[in-house]
Image: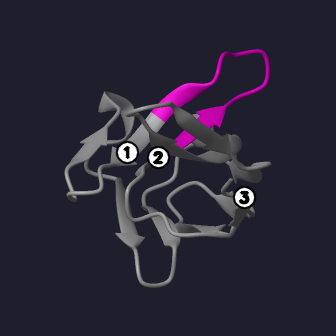
């Protein structure tokens, strides 16, 4: 089992930047890693994912502003967030997903990002 711990959330002004980190308790090499977010009263939504082969995917709402990256040697995933908007306010969750003989799907506890206008 992999435990995920997010960090880096904060209260920032619109236009600012943040770097979120997700530290895993074990190897993430074979996992597709992702960031999701959930705003108050809304469903959790995909923000960005990166496969074990380095292929990235982004939600349309964050393209050009967010960058996901992974460091397999350190078992860590990052989300660089630039040009923050008030609508980016949410709890951001890290996810590790792998399929195959059986599905492995792990979530962190989340980190709060609040953007003031």
Magenta run includes residue 42: yes
Provide residue 76's location: percent of width, then percent of height: 52, 72
Earlier in the chain: of badge 3 and badge 2, it is 3
Provide residue 31's location: percent of width, then percent of height: 42, 52
Provide residue 43's location: percent of width, then percent of height: 66, 16
- Residue beneath label 3, please? 3
Earlier in the chain: of badge 3 and badge 1, it is 3
Would you say the residues marked 1 and 2 are in contact, meaning their CB atoms lie under 8 Å apart?
Answer: yes
What residue is shown at x 66% (from left), y 57% (from top)?
Answer: 2
The secondary structure type at the circle numbered 3 is loop
* Figure coloring: one colour
What residue is shown at x 75% (from left), y 63% (from top)?
Answer: 10
Label 3: how many residues lie within 10 Å, few (<14), some (14-19) or many (20+)? Answer: some
Q: Would residue 98 appear left or right of 104 to someone viewing this image? A: left
Q: Is residue 117 visible?
A: no
- Residue beneath label 1, please? 49
**Span highlighted in magenta in the image:** 34-46
- Residue beneath label 2, please? 34
Residue 42 versus residue 48: which sits nearer the camera? 48
């Amino acid at each position: 089992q992999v435990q995920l711990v997010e960090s880096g959330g904060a209260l920032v002004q619109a236009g600012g930047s943040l770097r979120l980190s997700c530290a895993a308790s074990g190897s993430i090499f074979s996992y597709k890693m992702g960031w999701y977010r959930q705003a108050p009263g809304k469903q959790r939504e995909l923000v960005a994912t990166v496969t074990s082969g380095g292929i990235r995917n982004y939600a349309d709402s964050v393209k050009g502003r967010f960058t996901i990256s992974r460091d397999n040697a350190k078992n860590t995933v990052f989300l660089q967030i630039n040009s923050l908007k008030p609508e980016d306010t949410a709890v951001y969750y890290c996810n590790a997903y792998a399929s195959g003989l059986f599905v492995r799907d792990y979530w962190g506890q989340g980190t709060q990002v609040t953007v003031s206008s």
